[in-house]
Amino acid sequence: MKEVVRFARNGGTVIGICNGFQVLLEAGLLPGVLLRNSSLRFVCRYVQLRVERGDTRFTSGCREGEVLGIPVAHGDGNYFTDGDTLKRLEGNGQILFRYCERDGSITESSNPNGSLANIAGIINEQGNILGMMPHPERACDPILGHTDGQKIFRSIIEFVLHGERVFGDVAGAGR
């Protein structure tokens, strides 16, 4: 983990999915904690995510406001943080994905785990670390019935290959 932290702090691209998100939180690379799902039950199903920003290394292949179908599978996916941190996440544009309805509306019923502000994924202030509960890797092939996860991985690949020359300020400086 020391090498992951070093790599991340040096600007390396890091993505933590589900338990990987939990590890990033526990390592202090992202703010907040994951609590038991509000239902106290394991949740395994496809959900809709609204892309909050389309200008990061993780979402450059998406449009802001686009709705992606991505599965969740967790018992401890309820993202929580204090009010000041939530304000900072909101103000800095660090919330990348929120649970939503098919039309993109944010509702309590679209939130599978009780996450604060329907948060499904966040980035750090520098924009190089993403933590998210949903599993985009499980939505990357037509045989799985969904391909929306490809948009996230293609965004990362394009950033690694072309960096800021293609996407401009993908790290989110000034936001």
Image: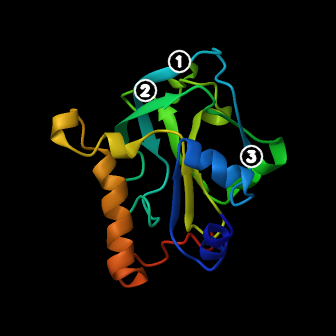
Residue 77 location, x and y as percent? 61, 32
Tell whether label 2 touches label 3 (CB within 8 Å). Answer: no
Number of numbered discs visible in the structure rendering: 3
Residue at which label 3 appears:
32
Q: CA distance from mark 3 to mark 1?
A: 22 Å
Tell whether label 1 touches label 2 (CB within 8 Å). Answer: yes
Residue at which label 2 appears:
101
Few, some or many C-alpha atoms within 10 Å of disc 1 (few <14, some 14-19, many ≥20)?
A: few
- 96 in relation to 162, above or below: above
Residue in view at x 64 percent, y 23 percent = 37
Residue at which label 1 appears:
109
Picture quadrant of residue 12: bottom right
- Dot 3 or dot 2: first in sequence order is 3
Mark 2 belongs to which amino acid? Glu
Image quadrant holding the N terminus, namely bottom right
Residue 51 location, x and y as percent? 44, 47
- 147 in relation to 1, above or below: above
Tell whether label 1 touches label 3 (CB within 8 Å). Answer: no
Residue in view at x 63 percent, y 14 percent = 39
